[in-house]
């Protein structure tokens, strides 16, 4: 009995186009997990080249400042920037700005994503409704939404609300469009299977549609988080009392380039951290996809 | 199960008084198609008749294979029984009751395995039970029992993309049967498998069915598969589908596809069927 079942496994391997090693057949989940871990591990030559590029970039930065490619008063060296950064993180005003900008970003992201998700789901489900809404959404989406910032500041004030609204509007379209497309791209077979098993509309939504759109939706949410930060910083450029963007525009206006460069680095780091945060959630939710891509990468 | 029991009772009470013993009453047939026609409205081409006036009665517990040229309307017949569509004319009924939507005692395995990529193998098999609100522990034990019988239990926690095609089909079988349906609708379940894998999966499938008392409608392109597995083979004409030939396969059970692949009696029946079918293909 034992031998016949292993035989089945071995033979089934043959009809698989990307025949993996035989052990893969008997212990697939463990194998795949090991593989993912190996892919995540550090690849020394890659790390070495990355460090080299980093050093070279800092070198170019330093050289360009010292050599005065631009007037010295418009630039700051890496060292000056780093010193200012260390100084800044010890000031409570910096952390206050950080907190304001971050909370505006988060709120804009959550509100815009929720609205985008809901509208995308509804329009993806009811095609006729989508046909009605389509010209309006296309028109609204085509508008450069940053141009709305002055209006929002006028309507919602110099405080956080105008930034949150601007971020939410930008985030809304980033999430709504792919969500709507994803709903209509859920394989109809999966819905048919659920239908024949007697699933209600609600069950189909929960068991087929929602998990089926997760991959594209998460891609959109990750992008949206970074755009939310972008929108908030832009809003703060135009008018704000506190915030990293406000601090940045003030420092450039005063030719305080050390502060400006330090803030630029803070903002870039923030965007990277936000991106990593959403990716971490994404990896947890979409575990099956990580396994899928690792399985296919083996055949190369 | 319940519907079937009532069918039998109704026959004994009704049958003794009214109808003479001219065959089973409609209530006793697991599946009945009476004068069933299906026309599709194809934009630009008008009405396309896919199924033309079919009569078919399948007693409970019979394994029926449906064979016919590609595009003749086999899937359409299964779709009607699964309650996914209605006939344009005629009546499709089960135990005398017209089919008016998906039913919980029918298992339908689509031609494409259509596994849910984000669910593990076990969770895929549990889908129907979950829809039915069966408790998690019960779901697990039923899914694992089926996976064991199909010899893929060690893949329970894997995802479909990690499985070979033959294994995916076995998972689809397990998913279809996990809800313990009374009628099994199988649409070319083994069509895309290589010859060796197919014989294996056929044996496993037959072992699950034999002695279960369930009714099977099994669509296939493969005559030898039809003869090997079924009690009765229906040959359909090319579109619009009519029944060309209805033939019993009088070979004892249990059968063993691995040993009977070249059984002369089966080959004889297959030859007869082929003579009928080849005129339809031309
Ligand atoms: N939704 C539909 N709209 C229009 N025509 C359809 C539709 N579904 C099926 N048909 C047509 O009806 C005919 C029968 O289709 P069906 O899928 O039942 O064939 P089949 O016997 O299962 O074929 P195959 O063996 O290739 O699977 C085909 O000619 C097909 O083009
Ligand atoms: Mg078909």
Image (spheres, coloured by chain):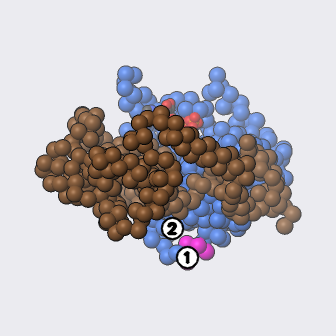
Chain colours: A brown, B blue
Q: Would residue B221 be counted in the magenta stretch? A: no
User: Which mark identifies residue A278?
Assistant: none
- Few, some or many C-alpha atoms within 10 Å of disc 2 (few <14, some 14-19, many ≥20)? many
The residue labelled by disc 1 is B138
- Find residue A101 and report its horizontal and vertical position in percent: 32, 58
Q: Nearer the viewer, residue B183 or A38?
A: A38
- Main secondary structure along the magenta-highlighted residues: helix
The residue labelled by disc 2 is B129
Residue A96 visible in image: yes
At a point 64% along the width and 70% down the height, the residue shown is B144
- Find residue A55 and report its horizontal and vertical position in percent: 62, 47
User: Which portion, as a residue range, is magenta?
Assistant: B137-141
Q: Nearer the viewer, residue A65 or A17?
A: A65
Q: How far apart are the two marked residues, 1 and 2, measured between alpha carbons?
A: 9 Å
At a point 60% along the width and 55% down the height, the residue shown is A290
Of the residues under marks 1 and 2, which one precedes in the sequence? Answer: 2
Residue B188 visible in image: no
- Find residue A9 and report its horizontal and vertical position in percent: 79, 56
At a point 80% along the width and 59% down the height, the residue shown is A23
Q: Nearer the viewer, residue A292 or A193?
A: A292
Quadrant hosting residue A130: top left
User: A145 left or right of B241?
Assistant: left
- Find residue B149 and report its horizontal and vertical position in percent: 71, 66
């Amino acid at each position: 009995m034992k031998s016949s079942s292993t035989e089945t496994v071995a033979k089934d391997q043959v009809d698989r186009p990307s025949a993996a090693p035989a052990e893969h057949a008997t212990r697939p989940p463990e194998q795949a997990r090991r593989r993912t871990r190996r892919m995540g591990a550090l690849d020394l030559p890659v790390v070495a080249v990355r460090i080299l590029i980093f050093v070279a970039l800092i070198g170019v930065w330093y050289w360009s400042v010292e050599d005065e490619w631009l007037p010295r008063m418009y630039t700051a060296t890496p060292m000056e920037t780093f010193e200012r950064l260390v100084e800044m993180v010890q000031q409570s005003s910096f952390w206050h700005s950080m907190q304001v900008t971050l909370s505006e970003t988060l709120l804009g992201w959550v509100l815009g994503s929720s609205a985008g998700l809901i509208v995308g789901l509804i329009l993806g489900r009811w095609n006729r409704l989508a046909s009605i809404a389509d010209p309006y959404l296309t028109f609204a989406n085509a508008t450069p939404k940053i141009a709305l910032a002055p209006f929002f500041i006028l309507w919602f004030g110099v405080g956080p609300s105008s930034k949150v609204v601007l971020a939410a509007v930008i985030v809304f379209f980033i999430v709504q469009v792919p969500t709507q497309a994803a709903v209509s791209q859920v394989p109809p077979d999966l819905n048919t299977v659920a239908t024949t098993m007697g699933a209600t509309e609600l069950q189909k939504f929960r068991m087929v549609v929602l998990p089926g759109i997760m991959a594209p939706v998460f891609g959109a949410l990750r992008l949206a988080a970074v755009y939310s930060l972008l929108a908030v910083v832009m809003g703060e450029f135009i008018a704000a009392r506190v915030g990293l963007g406000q601090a940045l525009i003030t420092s450039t206006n005063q030719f305080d380039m050390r502060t400006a460069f330090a803030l630029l680095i803070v903002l870039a780091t923030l965007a990277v951290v936000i991106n990593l945060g959403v990716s971490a959630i994404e990896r947890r939710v979409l575990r099956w996809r990580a396994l899928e891509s690792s399985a296919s990468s083996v055949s190369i | 199960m319940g519907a079937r029991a009532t069918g039998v009772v109704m026959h004994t009470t009704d049958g003794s008084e009214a109808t003479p013993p001219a065959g089973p009453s409609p209530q006793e047939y697991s599946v009945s198609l009476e004068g069933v026609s299906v026309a599709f409205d194809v934009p630009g081409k008008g009405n396309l008749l896919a199924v033309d006036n079919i009569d078919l009665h399948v007693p409970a517990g019979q394994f029926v294979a449906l064979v016919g040229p590609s595009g003749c309307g086999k899937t359409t017949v299964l779709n009607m029984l699964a309650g996914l569509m209605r006939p344009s004319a005629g009546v499709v009924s089960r135990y005398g009751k017209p089919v008016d939507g998906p039913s919980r005692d029918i298992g339908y395995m689509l031609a494409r395995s259509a596994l849910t990529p984000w669910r593990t193998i076990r969770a895929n098999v549990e889908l129907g039970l979950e829809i039915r609100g069966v408790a998690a522990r019960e779901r697990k034990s039923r899914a694992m029992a089926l996976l064991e019988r199909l010899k893929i239990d060690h893949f329970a926690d894997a995802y479909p993309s990690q499985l070979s095609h033959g294994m995916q089909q076995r998972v689809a079988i397990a998913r279809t049967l996990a809800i313990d349906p009374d009628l099994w609708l199988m649409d070319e379940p083994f069509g895309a498998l290589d010859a060796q894998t197919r014989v294996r999966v056929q044996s496993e499938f037959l072992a699950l069915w034999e002695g279960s008392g369930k009714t099977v409608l099994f669509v296939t392109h493969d005559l030898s598969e039809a003869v090997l597995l079924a009690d009765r083979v229906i040959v359909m004409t090319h579109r619009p589908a009519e029944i060309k030939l209805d033939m019993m396969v009088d070979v004892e059970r249990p059968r063993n596809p691995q040993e009977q692949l070249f059984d002369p009696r089966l080959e004889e029946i297959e030859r007869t069927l082929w003579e009928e079918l080849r005129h339809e293909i031309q």
